[in-house]
Image (cartoon, rainbow, N blue to C red):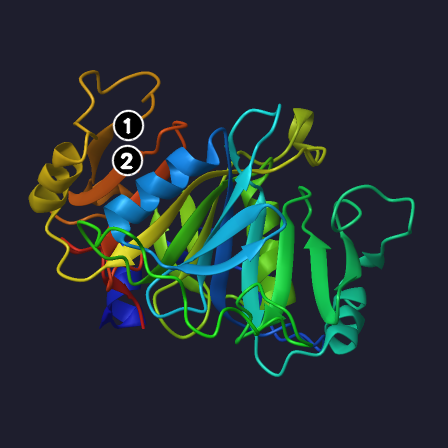
Amino acid sequence: MKTISRRNLLQSLPFFAIAPRFLSQTSKPVVSVKALNYFALEVSDMKRSLDFYQGLFGMPVQLHRDGGVLLRIGNGPQFMSLMPAGSNPPRIVPNVGMSVGNFNADRIVATLLEHGVTKAQASDPGLSGGPMKVRIKMRDRTQEVYLGDPDGLVLQLQDTSFCGGSGPLGNMCLAKPEPSPKQGLMAVKNLSHFTINSSDGNRSNAFYREVFGLPDRSKQGAAVGLGVGPGVMFLMFAGGGGGRGGAPAAPKPASINHVCMNMENFVPDAVMKTLASYGIPQRENPQGPVGPLKSYISLRMENRGGAPGGTPELYFTDPDGLLLQLQDVTYCGGAGFLGNVCVG
């Protein structure tokens, strides 16, 4: 990831127009997250989706679990979970996996309570119990921590070795991942970011800065990329703030707009040709719904933190129309042709 000095960035962008209150000193401890860990798709046809992703990326199976399949991203333990949607519409599940060093469930919960989060009751619905609630669930011998953010987005907090498997840390998966029956046309290396639809982006940013200590890594117009870990991963929240008369907006269920994975030697035109050869042509109409099995490039211009002439951001949809993004391994949501010029 290329960096520019904070001073130079401040000269070129009104970066602190929404200055985070986390920059001020706080006596509360934070849950220090190290990386994004996984995302989950609920799909209409498991075989079709498994064939699609393995044929495109050659992803091995890291684990079979609960009727679903965990596909390894790069060298792992990061993974993509495919699960049957059943009678529900296919979707990107509104769960974000994040890893924590020296995982201790009780210590994490104690820290969250200091930030106004409450323990979920047995009768509370969902994995976390709802917005601003936390629950520890036992899966066999594995403690799993589920937190609901202000919009009810579920965050699963696990050890950095978590692969979705068994054992106290959930890091016991297949001793040797099952290789993909197809080599794949290109390889993904890691998770890059989640772009999340929230009811109030400013409130979400404040929550994640305060609770997790996430720094500002990039800026795209009014949206801020909050850095996860020391590398290039980030979270970005899109959504207006406030209700009528400036009153806080009532929490509403969050949704994940898209998930991005990264790859080496990212050449947009070459990736588009590869996608087209796999039956994912460029969409005809740049406006309106994308539809399944389409691809497109959106140029993020300088007014949204992009490069002169635009930073190419590449998207495609899977057989269910679920939206994913592909970028270079250096992409951090910032300026430059590869989007790799961010705050150091």
Give how far across and how far down residue 99 sits, in percent.
55, 69
Element type where label 2 sits in the image: strand
Whether residue 85 is visible here, answered yes or no, is yes
Give how far across and how far down residue 258 sits, in percent.
41, 40
Q: Residue at x 35, y 70 (%)?
A: 75
Looking at the rendered structure, which numbered label has been put on residue 293?
1
The span from disc 1 to disc 2 (Cα, nearest Å) is 7 Å
Seen from the viewer's position, the closer of residues 259 and 18 is 259
What kind of residue is marked 1?
Leu
Residue 153 left/right relative to 280: right
Element type where label 1 sits in the image: loop
- Sequence-earlier tag: 1 or 2: 1
Looking at the rendered structure, which numbered label has been put on residue 316?
2
Residue 75 left/right relative to 202: left
Q: Residue at x 28, y 35 (%)?
A: 316
**Residue 198 drawn above or below residue 106:** above
Seen from the viewer's position, the closer of residues 277 and 147 is 277
Q: Residue furthest bottom?
A: 102
Circle 2 Cα neighbour tier, 10 Å, few/some/many (<14 / 14–19 / ≥20): many
